[in-house]
């Protein structure tokens, strides 16, 4: 019997999927969780964890480490609505054994769980290498971006975040209690250090690298 | 936490069917399992007409999982899984009582069917619009869904 943990915040889907698993003679859902916090308490005695990436309190891959600590043979199948290969690559790099898009048929999900429990790969070695390469490239870009961002002074970061808040130069000046010319000087410096030509490009850079969050 | 009681072993086989084309005659007037087009149904006829539910939510894994669960837990409803791309014509064809969907495109004030907007664009959100209730929920469990279906089966 393959013991399954389901981690998915959309409750009606999670519960229905649990039923689909339990209708199979060789599959049994031993626990369900809607958040990472809930799941952390349910990692024991699990053979395969079926994990959504986009959870209310974080990314589902955060569970891979704790799960492997408890059971190094446990497998993680990521089930995601994201079509972004970078998300999949990141999950693989963090230790996910397989990933399926939520547009998959239930039969595919059941089959994937069975294959992973037998220690099989869901991807060909070439696909796996390609995903790992993608993850590596992304990690290098991320690291390079962090180095670039560290060149910004705290005040320049404030200006950049204020720009992300939709403020004009005059509003930024008032917000930071500095003169208008000082804001413009900081802005020029930010653009130079980030190696971009426009405020929009600076903003995109900041959003991509987590300096500015657009809610 | 919901745990299923009934155990049958054919989910994998059944789940491969995502669109059901039933041999019903052409386009029909809106179905109403409580009231006939000419007026009130008598009690016997009323209860012989099953609630017709179109399941057209996205993504497909959600739709198929719900189909498996609802078919087991409410075997008497007339449950039709429909690809969202075919929803317009399937509504015209089957005249459902209730439509479960993930897109707002077809929802207007005057649609004759009840609806549940389930996780539109992946949002943690469900909006319910039936005769018995109109509400927005941040979370909708399978038990909630069953309750809504049961309410819809009860005639006023």
Image (cartoon, coloured by chain):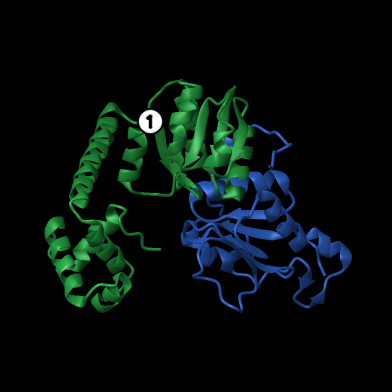
Chain colours: A green, B blue
Q: Is residue A62 left or right of residue A8?
A: left
Q: Is residue B145 above or below residue B87?
A: above
**Looking at the image, which is closer to me, A81 or B18?**
A81
Q: Is residue A33 left or right of residue A198?
A: right
Residue B67 x, y percent position in the rendering: 61, 48
Query: Is residue B117 at least partly visible in the picture?
Result: no
Q: Quick one: quadrant of the C terminus of chain B?
A: bottom right
Classify mark 1: residues with Cα within 10 Å, few (<14), some (14-19) or many (20+): some
**Residue shown at the point (17%, 61%) measured from the top left:** A190
Residue A86 x, y percent position in the rendering: 30, 44
**Residue shown at the point (69%, 54%) measured from the top left:** B144
Chain containing the residue with disc 1? A
Q: Is residue B111 left or right of residue A72?
A: right
Q: Is residue A87 above or below residue B133?
A: above
The residue that mark 1 highlights is A95
**Residue shown at the point (18%, 50%) measured from the top left:** A148
Residue B95 x, y percent position in the rendering: 63, 67
Q: Quick one: quadrant of the N terminus of chain B?
A: top right
**Looking at the image, which is closer to me, A57 or A125?**
A57
Residue B155 x, y percent position in the rendering: 81, 66
Q: Is residue A166 above or below residue A205?
A: below
**Looking at the image, which is closer to me, B95 or A110?**
A110
């Amino acid at each position: 019997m393959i013991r399954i943990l389901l981690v998915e915040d959309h409750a009606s889907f999670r519960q229905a999927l649990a039923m689909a698993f339990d209708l199979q003679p060789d599959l049994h859902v031993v626990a369900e969780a809607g958040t990472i916090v809930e799941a952390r308490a349910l990692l024991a005695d699990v053979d395969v964890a079926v994990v959504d990436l986009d959870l209310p309190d974080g990314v589902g891959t955060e569970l891979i480490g704790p799960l492997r600590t408890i059971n190094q043979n446990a497998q993680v199948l990521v089930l995601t609505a994201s079509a972004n290969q970078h998300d999949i690559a990141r999950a693989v790099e963090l230790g996910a054994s397989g990933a399926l898009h939520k547009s998959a048929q239930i039969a595919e999900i059941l089959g994937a769980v069975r294959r992973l429990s037998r220690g099989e790969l869901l991807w060909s070695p070439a696909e796996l290498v390609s995903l790992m390469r993608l993850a590596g490239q992304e990690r290098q870009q991320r690291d390079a971006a962090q180095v670039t961002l560290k060149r910004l002074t705290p005040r320049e970061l404030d200006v950049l975040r204020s720009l992300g808040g939709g403020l004009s130069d005059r509003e930024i000046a008032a917000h930071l209690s500095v003169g208008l010319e000082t804001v413009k000087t900081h802005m020029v410096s930010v653009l130079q250090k980030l190696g971009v030509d426009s405020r929009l490009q600076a903003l995109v850079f900041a959003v991509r690298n987590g300096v500015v969050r657009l809610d | 936490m919901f745990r299923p009681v009934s155990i049958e072993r054919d989910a994998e086989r059944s789940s491969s069917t995502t669109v059901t084309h039933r041999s019903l005659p052409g386009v029909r007037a809106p179905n109403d399992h409580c009231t006939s087009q000419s007026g009130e149904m008598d009690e016997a006829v009323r209860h012989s007409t099953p609630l017709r539910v179109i399941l057209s939510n996205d993504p497909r894994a959600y739709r198929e999982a719900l189909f498996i669960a609802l078919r087991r837990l409410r075997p008497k409803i007339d449950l039709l899984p429909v690809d969202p791309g075919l929803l317009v014509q399937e509504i015209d064809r089957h005249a459902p009582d209730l439509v479960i969907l993930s897109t707002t495109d077809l929802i207007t004030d005057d649609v004759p069917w009840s609806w549940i907007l389930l996780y539109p664009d992946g949002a943690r959100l469900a909006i319910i619009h039936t005769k018995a209730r109109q509400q927005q929920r941040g979370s909708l469990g399978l038990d909630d869904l069953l309750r809504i279906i049961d309410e819809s089966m009860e005639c006023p």
